[in-house]
Image (spheres, rainbow, N blue to C red):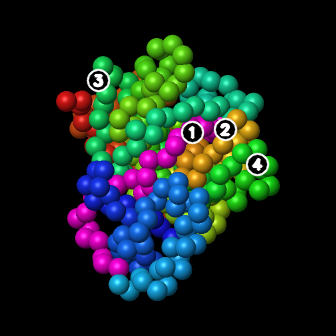
Amino acid sequence: MKLIRYGNPGQEKPGLILSDNKRIDISGFGEDFNEHFFGTDGLKRLRIWLDENKQNCKEISPSERLGPPCCRPSKIICVGLNYAKHAAEGGMAVPSEPVLFFKASSAIVGPNDDLIIPKGSDKTDWEVELAVVIGAAASYVENESAMDHVAGYVLHNDYSERHFQLEREGQWVKGKSCDTFAPIGPFIATREEIPDPHNLNLWLKLNGKTVQNSNTSDFIFDIPTVVSYISQFMTLLPGDIISTGTPFGVGLGMKPPRYLVPGDVIELGIDGLGSSKQVARSFQ
Ligand code: MG
């Protein structure tokens, strides 16, 4: 299934994209895509409900805004430097175990919402990433069973303010958490939609020019490793998002570096997970 949420910010309703690309409202199911939904076998219950009710679901107008395809999760955990060539462009060594950092969940916006360049920023950068949505709580899970805790996958742009991230002391969280720094979507693809998440092309274009173009087969740490690893330090809750890192081609790595300015258009996509588009705006 492909899960979406649509409507005005803060008032989104749940929906689905069907195999014929028709988008339907599933408000009648009575639940939103949140921790309770994922943690109580909501995907299975939704499938059963659809068998009875799909034909009565109203179609969603193509003009409706898409919101983030899940409710705000308890946390977003990001993996840094998970593609060898990206680590090299940042001048950083390939890590011996996953590098983790947090991103505030208040940064989440819809896939095509504007990027707001934060106050005082002159180094806002892009990062196309495959994100994983947790389906069942995970604490001290082994690699072998880690995928049982995954509900699906979603496209994410891990926007990053490099000055805040790298030149302001302490952890990366300052440069990762600004409002609008986590556009996710257009949809969550449930696991069966993506048979091999470790062989997906992912790309990002800046003003129509391709700047990132890689494949998740270049991961240093694969998804089961990352899920198992994080679960050694914290409990992953249903609906939590893990962003698996970005490939080569961010603005920081260009010579000279290229950072975002108002009016820039950022488009990104991953095989099987659709595409998104943000326009950069200045903070008002
Ligand atoms: Mg990243």
Q: Which residue is mark 1?
A: 77
Nearest to viewer (mark 1 / mark 2): 2
Q: Residue furthest left?
A: 284
Residue 174: quadrant of the picture? top left
What's the amino acid at mark 3?
Lys
Helix, strand or loop under label 4: loop
Relative to 164, residue 142 above or below: below
Tell me, for residue 234, which label it has, or none: 2
Q: Quadrant of the C terminus?
A: top left
Distance from label 4 to label 2 (Cα)?
11 Å
Q: Which segment did they paint magenta?
A: 57-86
Relative to 171, residue 187 above or below: below
Q: Which residue is mark 3?
A: 119
What's the amino acid at mark 1?
Ile
Q: Position of residue 153 (x, y in %)?
A: 55, 57
Helix, strand or loop under label 3: loop
Tell me, for residue 3, which label it has, or none: none
